[in-house]
Image: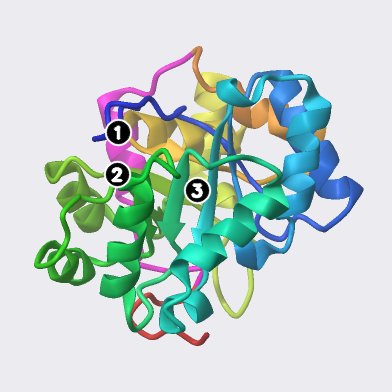
Amino acid sequence: MKLNTGKEMPDIGLGVFRTQQGDETVNAVKAALKIGYRQIDTAMIYRNEKEVGDGIRQSGVAREDIFLTTKLWTDDVRAKNTTAAYQTSIDNLGVEQVDLYLIHWAAEGYQEAWADMEKLYEDKKVGAIGVSNFQIHHLKELEKTAKYTPAVNQIESHPYHSNQELIDYCQSKGIVVTAYSPLGGQPKDGFLEDLKDETIVELANKYGKSAAQIVLRWHLQRGIVIIPKSKSENRIAENFAVFDFELSADDMASISALNKNQRMGADPDNLPF
């Protein structure tokens, strides 16, 4: 996927949210890079930036061939600590810069944080800058003072929360959308599990693919970057094997029709942290 900076961002990456410190993260990163992934997505608040860096170095894949993303946490947004927080992240990762730095959530002060990120970009200390969990109104507010349009908006999207209105808005502005939790989540508090939905299971049988592969292909055909998370090498490989088939227009529509506006994560307009 081409960013508004002109740089290419791989269509699929490994997410490491809730991947544990130590060997679990290191091994997941190494496995993904061995399989062929060239994008790794982490964040300061995941507490595994060091392990991500270790996994990259141990993989044998050249740093310049890997698209690396990390994020500015809400505490640092509110504390006006963008520049120092970025330095801490790249120190933890053991890299000179990341390819993409995101404001993790639209916490109070995000406009000033964005101005600081623009300075990092202008000083060529970061490859691209973007946001995460920004709603349309956040993007419109940012546009009032921003010199640069965010390259990426990373948001929750899966069949039960397609978030299509926000995706359409971002794409109309040249903002690449990355979907986190692209496969939905486990049943909890009355929530359903996307991958066990009858429609998804029927399509998996039709195409001879797993339910996860069907959903990931749905995202890709909507023009969205995906960062599925797994610590299992077999599952990491399965998630990557989604480029050898295509869903029909009718099947795409049947998945989109599953939308329930059902979030698995936090509401960006009511931050609990």
Toward the viewer: 115 or 258? 115
Q: Give above or below for 69 relative to 62.
A: below
Q: Give above or below for 37 relative to 229.
A: above
* Left or right of 37 in this view: 184: left
* Left or right of 269 in this view: 139: left
Residue at left offset 13%, top offset 62%: 143
Checking the image for residue 151, the label placed there is 2
Checking the image for residue 3, the label placed there is 1
In front of the other: label 3 or label 2? 2
Pointers 1 and 2 in contact (CB under 8 A)?
yes
| Image quadrant containing the N terminus | top left
Q: Is residue 188 visible?
A: yes
Residue 153 in magenta?
no
Q: Position of residue 271 (x, y in %)?
A: 43, 84
Q: Position of residue 178 (x, y in %)?
A: 40, 45
Structural crowding at the residue carrying mark 3, measured as other residues with C-alpha within 10 Å and reported as few (<14), some (14–19) or many (≥20): many
Q: Position of residue 103 (x, y in %)?
A: 41, 63
User: What element does badge 3 sit on?
Assistant: loop
